[in-house]
Amino acid sequence: MARHRTIKGTLQIEGQEIQITNPDKPLWPEVGITKAIYLQKLAAISPYLLRYCRGRLLTTIRYPHGVEGESFYQKNAPEPLPPFVTTYIHENINYVLLNGLPELLWLGNLAALEFHPSLHLAGSEQPCEWMIDLDPSQQEEPRIMEATAIVGSVLQSLGLSSVPKTSGATGVQVIVPISDGITFDDLRSVGQFVGQYVTEKHPELFTLERLKKNRGNKIYFDYLQHYSGRTLAAPYTPRARTLATVSTPLTWDEVQQDVSPKEFHLLNIVDRLKDKGDLLQALAPQPIENVIHQLKSQTKRPSKRKG
């Protein structure tokens, strides 16, 4: 059997040399994205993607033979480690800190197709933002934008503006920028409050059931995933889906128009960012302290409700 010829080259990025292997390897064959095209797209979206990965503990999902091949999660930094890559040891795992373009392209060459950062900075116990994860139980969920709109409306009624983003898969995350000093436990209490409210108001749509087999066709309102040591797909990370979808912040108008997460992918994300910029960056930290304070004062106060 003829051996596949390995093609190698180097990139000079910000004074660093990055080895590139097999640039013609198909990573998303159905949409014609090779490794070379992937690296070009990563470079173009890097100012946005890096903003939500820098300084955080990084988990990647690698697909050495493209999205149609086998994959594995990588938490420990791959070896050999280039000199420009910084790592941080947390709970005996040596995580990569994705702090710049050279690191991003190095990981891209290793066919890291998804980037899942921790929800806090390395060495910190404080959340960087608040995320509610709306996780469908079905492969195709036509109600996901309806559910997203309901959650956004409830948050708005609490005085909190938010930004929805596609996960790049089937779900949506609703993101609330926050100020320093909030704890993960504070956010869990608000998440539980909102989750119980929407499941009571819309029992046919939402569930708080953690086990997928017990959810039926309902959308899981996941407020528990947002916690120290856990990850969610970064804004602007590509996803290892057939259409090369990208986790993309949306406008609320787009949610109302029932857009499909499949509409946002590596082949059009650069034009979208030129047109709309970073919708997450445009929203200031929200006064979630007010909601936390209200909840704490209610739990301390004896209930006057009957029955």
Image (cartoon, rainbow, N blue to C red):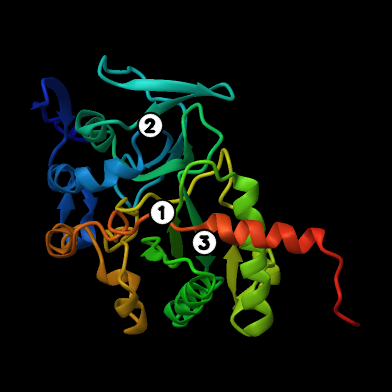
- Reading the image, the residue beneath label 3 is 133
Task: Look at the numbered disc 1 and give the secondary structure of its residue.
Answer: loop
Instruction: Say left or right for 207 vs 275.
Output: right
Which residue corresponds to mark 2? Answer: 55
Amino acid type indicated by mark 2: Gly
Quarter of the image that includes the C terminus: bottom right
Point out the frontmost of discs 1 and 3. 1
Residue located 34% across and 70% down the image:
261
Q: Work out how far the residue at label 1 is from the one at label 3, CA to CA, in angstroms.
A: 19 Å
Instruction: Please tell me which residue lies in front, 80 or 292.
Output: 292
Please provide percent x and percent y for residue 142.
44, 82
User: Residue 303, which numbered label?
Assistant: none
* Amino acid type shown at disc 3: Asp
For the N terminus, the image quarter is top left
**Residue 216, percent across and down?**
65, 77
Q: Position of residue 73 (x, y in %)?
A: 46, 39
Crowd rating for badge 1 (residues with CA inside 10 Å; few <14, some 14–19, many 20+): some
Name the residue at 25% across, 35% down.
104
Q: Are marks 2 and 3 in contact (CB under 8 Å)?
A: no
Determine the secondary structure under disc 3.
strand
Residue, disc 1: 285
